[in-house]
Image: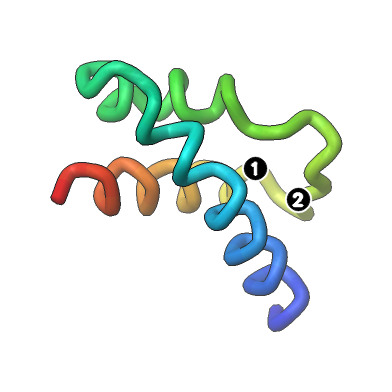
Amino acid sequence: MPHAAGNLLRTAREMLPVVRQMPRTARHEPAAVLAVLPDDREMERAEWIWLFAEAVVIAVSF
């Protein structure tokens, strides 16, 4: 689990600037956030990506 958490943190650092450049309405659409995830990022499960997308939406909402 620590390895997956490290991947999420690294991905979050890479993705926050990208998500912040998205139109505010698109930030609330998980599909739009998932579309900008790097293709080469290896996640073990799709749930991790979904949880990350939800966390990004929450983070950029404030």
* Residue at image location 29% in from the left, 17% down from the top: 23
* Disc on res. 46: 1
- Kind of residue sitting beneath label 2: Met
* Residue at image location 70% in from the left, 82% down from the top: 2
* Residue at image location 36% in from the left, 34% down from the top: 20
Above or below, 32 against 20 in this view is: above
If the image is split into quadrants, where does the N terminus sit? bottom right
* Disc on res. 43: 2
* Mark 1, other Cα within 10 Å: few <14 / some 14–19 / many ≥20: few
Q: In this view, does 61 lie to the left or right of 57?
A: left
Name which quarter of the figure residue 8 lies in. bottom right
* Disc on res. 15: none
The location of residue 39, given as percent across then percent down, is 79, 29
Q: Do the residues labelled 1 and 2 touch (CB within 8 Å)?
A: yes
The location of residue 56, given as percent across then percent down, is 38, 47
The location of residue 3, given as percent across then percent down, is 77, 75
Q: Rounded to the nearest whole Å, what is the CA distance between mark 1 and mark 2?
A: 7 Å
Q: In this view, does 29 lie to the left or right of 43?
A: left
Q: Which of pointers 1 and 2 indicates the residue nearer the eye? A: 2
Q: Is residue 31 left or right of residue 55?
A: right
* Residue at image location 28% in from the left, 53% down from the top: 59
Above or below, 11 against 10 in this view is: above
Q: Is mark 2 on a helix, strand or loop?
A: loop
The location of residue 5, given as percent across then percent down, is 63, 72
- Kind of residue sitting beneath label 1: Ala
* Mark 2, other Cα within 10 Å: few <14 / some 14–19 / many ≥20: few
Instruction: Give the farthest residue toward the bottom.
Output: 2
Q: Is mark 1 on a helix, strand or loop?
A: helix
